[in-house]
Image (cartoon, helix red, strand yellow):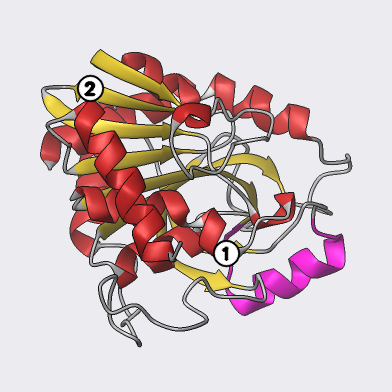
Amino acid sequence: MALFDRVSETAAWLSARIAPVPEVALVLGSGLGAFGDRVAASTVVPYAEIPHWPPAGVVGHAGKLVAGTVRGRRVLALSGRAHLYEGHDPATVTFATRVLGRLGVKTLILTNAAGGINMAFRSGALMVITDHINLQGTNPLIGANDDRFGRRFPDMSEVYSRRLRAHAEAAARALGLSVEHGVYVALTGPSYETPAEIVALRALGADAVGMSTVPEAIVARHMGLEVLGISCISNMAAGILPQPLTEEEVIQTTARVSREFISLLEGVLERL
């Protein structure tokens, strides 16, 4: 079955279960799934029950779709995502994003846990993504283009919406939160970066590094969705602090700042 047909079949299956379909969706990264617990009057669908849907097999990813209401706005939250480092191809990694577009979602908020490259950052900071650098060695749009998804050569001069970034800044000010702004660079992983790689990435202009988000952002823009990206700086990148990097630190840090992160997301939703 062609990708468009699989995406359409999945979208039809979901729309029958979560109608009316929200126009706003969020992808919750490592350790950030607690937001899903704030969704009221929710319908919860485990990924394992959704046709063609890839599993979320990483620690900190619950692997469920939650539809309901947050601060009076109907939303769709994906608790967990697929990654290239799990062995998935780009089409699988971005399958959920394709489905969201076919469902009629207009606004996509992408969240992740990332390593801090900018020396001015601190562990636990929240960073609004201003742009990205794709160093994953692939692009989810490689191959034959299906015009029903989008144009062959989509513009990427404003992947992360200025309008949505302004909403995030306003929400942070209202909450008394200090947020960073910066460039996110995506590598494949799953090994963490070496100190030498971090020095090189800093020279390229990156402020934070992770292993997700960029393929989803590219596909979302291909389909005309408006995108906001927010990173939780879960640890400082390799070589900055005299300690090894672990996934336990990522989960602990995101748990520590989850209340601030959730408040920021709710503030953004109120302003849409």
* Marks 1 and 2 in Cβ contact (< 8 Å): no
* Residue kind at label 2, given as amino acid type: Gly
- Badge 2: residue crowd in 10 Å (few <14, some 14–19, many ≥20): many
The residue lying at 80 percent from left, 68 percent from top is: 197
Residue 32 can be seen in this image? no
Residue 69, above or below 30: above
Q: Give x and y (percent) for residue 21.
A: 17, 36
Any magenta on residue 194? yes
Left or right: 58 as drawn, with respect to 99: right
Residue furthest front as drawn: 1
* Residue kind at label 1, given as amino acid type: Pro
Q: CA distance from mark 1 to mark 2?
A: 29 Å
The residue lying at 52 percent from left, 80 percent from top is: 142
Tell which tag, 1 or 2, sits nearer the viewer.
1
The residue lying at 57 percent from left, 34 percent from top is: 124
The image shows a total of numbered marks equal to 2
Secondary structure at numbered mark 2: strand
Residue 94, above or below 144: above
Q: Give x and y (percent) for residue 250.
A: 68, 33
Residue 168, above or below 3: above
Region in magenta: 193-209
- Name which of mark 1 and mark 2 comes first in the sequence: 2
On residue 90, the disc is: 1
Q: Which residue is mark 2?
A: 68
Residue 221 can be seen in this image? yes
Secondary structure at numbered mark 1: helix
Residue 129 falls in image quadrant: bottom left
